[in-house]
Amino acid sequence: MSSAPQANLQDLTAAGVSVWLDDLDRTRITSGQLADMITIDSVRGVTTNPTIFEKAISGGAAAYADQLAALANAGSDVDSIIRSLTTDDVRAACDVFLPLFETSNGEDGRVSIEVDPRLAHDTEATVDQARQLWAIVDRPNALIKIPATPEGLPAITEVIGSGISVNVTLIFSVERYDAVVEAYVRGLELALERGHDLTRIRSVASFFISRIDTEVDGRLRDIESPAAQALHGEAAIATGRLVWQAHLESTRSPRWAELERAGAHRQRPLWASTGVKDPTMAPTRYVLDLVVRGCVNTMPEATLRAVADNGPVPRDTVDGTFAASAEVWSSLESLGISQADVSATLEAEGVTKFIDSWEQLRGTVSAAAGL
């Protein structure tokens, strides 16, 4: 890897996009690669999920072997071992990012860890585990990931209200994004009532991009009409842009102004699932078509490298697109493709996929620990 900063990723940062890496493993931390990516690739944060941890542990057995053996010999069960391995990695990554966290005044240098996805429909258990993870990681630059399910929304409010920073995940529609914003605002109001320092609380709202095109384009192929063909690959970017419009509107209310005066920070939209699934699309599509100042884009490394290798980076591809984006969904609805149904389908699938990944992670750890 070259030691010179990568120009396109620098340009993306200069355009106001916070570049986060959607990947983490112990070797990346201990080898110094993660620190190099901060300097060279303008990486300003890391997101994780059960799939990422399963891949890390199954692919990096040597890096985890001693700790796995020690925990197994001490009588730890599978879930306790997973918690120890993952929180140790997140804590170590937080330490790597601490200088950036401090120089960015807490905005970046963030590392996310997710509550057990099996709790996605259990509000109280989600709150309890979020508090536990926050205490175990014990770093101010951690983010606790909570899904934006109906049961997750009140958990988000309570966890924010406890002074804990949150990454809200699995958002697939503007309607659900609006509910996430409301959960965040209520949480800040609760935190203020409880005497927490609002300047220390941060949040991002992770909107999943590529999965929308995968679902909608599959439905469009079933329609087989010129109108449907013309909309292929349009839904995800249009929805992301409408989320940005909703974000701007949410920051203009008197209610938000009062919180901002008390030190609250805006909940930044985060573009997640930005790896392109359709080989006919440019691999940079879900990055370069969603450039706007104040957002986060978390990328798998392959997408990050594609952006690095394919310039130039535009300054803004979101502002001024809202009417056209609304028209995309108007056209989709006229073809019988409901945004509400697409969102509900993707949310259910998203929870199931994360649970499946969690169970695969449990199986990997159980086998490696000899349990």
Image (cartoon, rainbow, N blue to C red):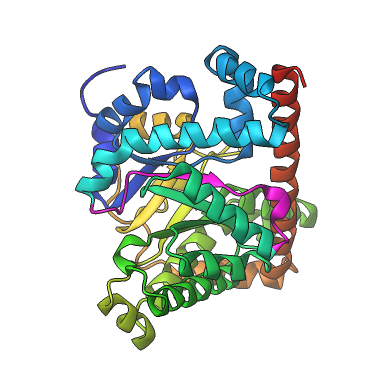
> Is residue 23 visible to the viewer in this orientation of the structure?
no
Residue 190 is left or right of residue 234, and the answer is left
Instruction: In this rendered view, identify the residue nearer to me: 320 or 20.
Output: 20
The image shows residue 88, relative to residue 290, as above or below, that is above
Residue at the location (29% across, 65% down)? 199
How many numbered callouts? 0
Q: Position of residue 76 (x, y in %)?
A: 68, 29
What's the magenta region?
105-122
| Residue placed furthest toward the front | 74
Q: Quadrant of residue 212?
A: bottom right
| Residue placed furthest toward the top | 62
Q: Quadrant of residue 57?
A: top right
Q: Position of residue 333 (x, y in %)?
A: 68, 71
Residue at the location (25% across, 42% down)? 100
Quadrant (top left/top right/bottom left/bottom right) for the C terminus: top right
Residue 60 is left or right of residue 269, and the answer is right
Instruction: In this rendered view, identify the residue nearer to me: 10 or 251.
Output: 251
Residue 300 is left or right of residue 312, and the answer is right
Q: Position of residue 169 (x, y in %)?
A: 56, 55
Residue at the location (64% across, 20% down)? 58
Quadrant (top left/top right/bottom left/bottom right) for the N terminus: top left
The image shows residue 232, relative to residue 333, as above or below, that is above
| Residue 245 among those drawn in magenta | no
Instruction: In this rendered view, identify the residue nearer to me: 231 or 90.
Output: 90
The image shows residue 218, relative to residue 175, as above or below, that is above
